[in-house]
Image (tube, grey):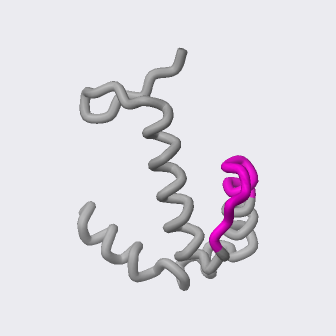
Amino acid sequence: MLRTIINGEVVAREAVLAWEDRRTAAVRRKLKLAPSAAPRDQQRRELLDRKLALGHDGLRTLIGRGLWLSDKITH
């Protein structure tokens, strides 16, 4: 059995999947993909395909400001 531990606490699989669903929706918006009710595995594939189609430069163009802010916070 797989257990997820965050900040020292065991987190239920349903909670992890709910978090993934929220993040997927946010990432879809950033990548200019329409909202989707497709199964989770299909949405994962759609995100991967979109990222590969955009390439490095395309991703930086779409999320560049967020990357700049993230870089400032982590360094």
Q: Is residue 74 above or below residue 69?
A: above
Question: Relative to residue 58, is residue 62 drawn left or right?
Answer: left
Total residue callouts: 0
Residue 60 in the image, given as x and y percentages of width and height = 53, 78
Q: Residue at x 27, y 61 (%)?
A: 74
Residue 36 in the image, given as x and y percentages of width and height = 67, 65
Q: Is residue 40 above or below residue 33?
A: above
Residue 39 in the image, given as x and y percentages of width and height = 72, 50
| Quadrant where the image shows the C terminus | bottom left
Where are the magenta residues, as a range?
A: 35-45
- Whether residue 16 appears in magenta in the rendering, the answer is no
Q: Is residue 54 above or below residue 73?
A: below
- Quadrant of the rendered image containing residue 53: bottom right
- Whether residue 39 appears in magenta in the rendering, the answer is yes
Residue 34 in the image, given as x and y percentages of width and height = 66, 76
**Residue located farthest toward the top when viewing the structure as drawn:** 1
Q: Residue at x 59, y 70 (%)?
A: 28
| Quadrant where the image shows the N terminus | top right
Question: Relative to residue 35, is residue 66 drawn left or right?
Answer: left
- Quadrant of the rendered image containing residue 45: bottom right
Q: Residue at x 49, y 36 (%)?
A: 14
Question: Relative to residue 33, is residue 53 drawn left or right?
Answer: right
Foreground of the two, 16 or 72: 16
